[in-house]
Amino acid sequence: MPDRAALVIAVETFFEAGPAVPYAAADAAELVRALPAAGYNPQKCLLVAGHRTTKAAVESHLARLSKLLGKADSLLVLVVSRAFAHKGRGYLLCADTITPDLTGTALPVADLVAALHKTRIPEVTVLLDLDPLAIQGELAPSGLDEDELAKLFDDSPACTALLAAAPGERSFESAQLRHGVWRSHLLEAFTGKTRSGVKPDGTLTAAGLHAFLADAVPRTLRRVYETPQEQTPLLFGEGHAGAVVADLAGLIGPGGDLLDPTRMRRVVFRAESRGRVKDLAGFHKTHSVPDRANEWARKYVNRVAQPDIKADLDNVFDAVREQFGYKRKDLDVSAERDGLGFVRTPDFEYTLTVHVDPDDPAEVIWRREVGRLSDPGFVRSEGFAAIFGTLFDKLVFEFAVPVDVAEFVDRIEEDPPEGVKVSVASGAEAAAVKLAGFGGRITVTRTAVEIEGRAGATAGLLDQFLAFLRKFSGVGEPKALEGRKD
């Protein structure tokens, strides 16, 4: 097992240079407590906070880092503070940084990186949550210098860096969460409360962590702030972003390999229904029913279906607020004018689309979907069943890269799993899979797996999807998706 070490520095309060960084010390301490369960050596998890965050104390820890940590396979570094740039160099504020001599009493970012290089640890991931220092005069509140960061980490032999916010942007906190927003999701990742970014074997890389944070932070900001806020997590040193920052296999529990987040992001529950154009709420007796499925018909249907889309979304909005207790600002709702509407919640996204039936232009096809599930167990909740339990009859898993259906069938026929039968069309465009004990239909195409059952059996569709993945764990993995080489 790799010997993982960590250095966590939290400068929450300053003698005079700037306002406090809310929740910095508490978030840092919580991360240190979480690290052993994420694969870290508890004897090598160092916390520097409180009165030990003066410049002399921080520099002392950095100078003695090799001695404090000994030999280690990887190092995680988190710094929470404020920062500024001067003449192309970035600086981190220490507790005793003074305004008359900012550059002389702050820690240069380059010195931090140099100290990490001296440890000779082969994999170093640096997490920087740094609010810009608001000051007057020639030292503008620019945060760190982006060009310097790019050079420091792109040229580094071992380091990659994740920034909570782009230089000059504020890193927000939330009284509702009682955490820094970026740090709250960092804790979520290291405690196994999300599978987003986690590989099937339970490991989380720096790149996977950044992908999760870059997606989660803007969504949380929309939820906890009334007015739009901008915070853009960044990654520097992509050449080392494959470094493993956590082993979460013991935290995510059984099934983590089946429900890795790259799969779950592509899973949607789907239901389709048909209706007549003349029954749409925006249709009037003076209107003409389309006789061809052309661009005019598409735009016309989008327009006259708008009241129906809005009514549907209003019903879902009211239902999810009642069932799950979401606040208004927890939800994003949009009834677009192009035949699309959606309701986004912290746990899932509901979408509704309408389009002309190409085989019968006098009719429309409604498609309802639920995706972006935060947790597969959410599908089994009473609230989900109350809102959607009788709606869906199909679960769709869309591949990131097309599958070679012929190769998939050949693999099954060479070593058929127990209780599995497969049939394929002569052109190998699609394969039908039968699982013993399941009366529904499973279809594998180049772009997706579709599991179709009876309406009202949403949880059963999920069970069959899991059963399918257990039988064919290679489908959806990069190796299985590469297709044939001629």
Image (cartoon, rainbow, N blue to C red):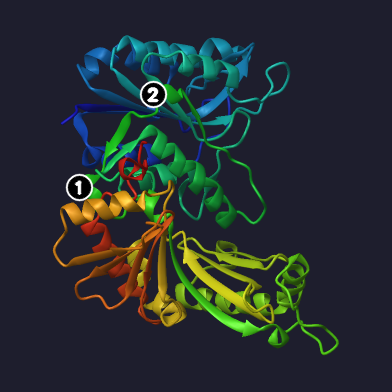
Residue flagged by tag 1: what amino acid is it? Gly
Callout in the foreground (1, 2): 2
Q: On the image, numbered disc 2 is attached to which residue?
A: 240
Name the residue: 65% across, 75% down.
Answer: 309
Instruction: Say if 103 sits above or below 197 in the image.
Output: above
Q: Estimate how packed mark 1 is, as few (under 14), some (14 to 19) or many (20 or more) residues with alpha carbons within 10 Å.
A: few
Q: Estimate how packed mark 2 is, as few (under 14), some (14 to 19) or many (20 or more) residues with alpha carbons within 10 Å.
A: many
Q: On the image, numbered disc 1 is attached to which residue?
A: 250
Q: Quadrant of residue 258?
A: bottom left
Residue flagged by tag 2: what amino acid is it? His
Instruction: Say if 184 sits above or below 110 in the image.
Output: below
Give the percent coordinates (x, y) of residue 58.
39, 18
Give the percent coordinates (x, y) of residue 394.
41, 72
Give the percent coordinates (x, y) of residue 328.
59, 67
Residue sitting nearer the eye, 435 or 84: 435
Residue sitting nearer the eye, 457 or 295: 295
Residue sitting nearer the eye, 201 or 6: 201
